[in-house]
């Protein structure tokens, strides 16, 4: 029996290791790694589920790749 992983979030650590970006469905949430508390939650902007998440080198922007073959940039500052 295979486990359904379609609802699992996509994850990325910030370059400094202090934040974790979690992409799920059409939402990105940034959280403090140590406490787990939400820093910022950004809704919408995607028409398909998020398939991948990455941080910019300065950690101020997250990029998400969607099931519609597009990339969306999210301002985390």
Image (spheres, rainbow, N blue to C red):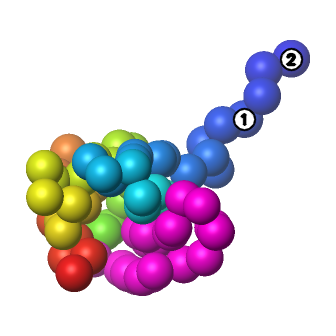
Q: Residue at x 32, y 67 (%)?
A: 47
- Residue 76 relative to residue 28: left or right: left
Instruction: Give the percent coordinates (x, y) of residue 60.
Output: 18, 68
Q: Residue at x 48, y 47 (%)?
A: 10
Residue for badge 2: 1
Most foreground residue, 70 or 18: 18
Instruction: Give the percent coordinates (x, y) of residue 62.
Output: 24, 61
How busy is the neighbourhood of tag 2: few (under 14 within 10 Å), some, or many (20 plus)?
few
- Disc 2, SS: loop
Q: How many marks?
A: 2
In magenta, the rendered stretch is: 25-45
Res. 4 mark: 1
User: Is residue 68 visible to the viewer in this orientation of the structure?
Assistant: no
Most foreground residue, 7 or 23: 23
The N terminus - image quarter: top right
Rendering quarter of residue 18: bottom left
Rendering quarter of residue 4: top right
- Disc 1, SS: loop
Q: Residue furthest right?
A: 1
Rendered position, 19 above or below 43? above
User: Is residue 75 visible to the viewer in this orientation of the structure?
Assistant: yes
């Amino acid at each position: 029996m295979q486990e359904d992983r379609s609802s699992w979030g996509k994850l990325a650590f910030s370059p400094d290791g202090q934040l974790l970006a979690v992409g799920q469905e059409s939402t990105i949430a940034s959280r403090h790694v140590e406490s787990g508390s939400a820093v910022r939650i950004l809704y919408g902007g995607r028409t398909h589920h998020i398939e991948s998440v990455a941080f910019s080198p300065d950690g101020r922007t997250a990029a998400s790749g969607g099931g519609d073959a597009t990339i969306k940039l999210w301002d985390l500052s």
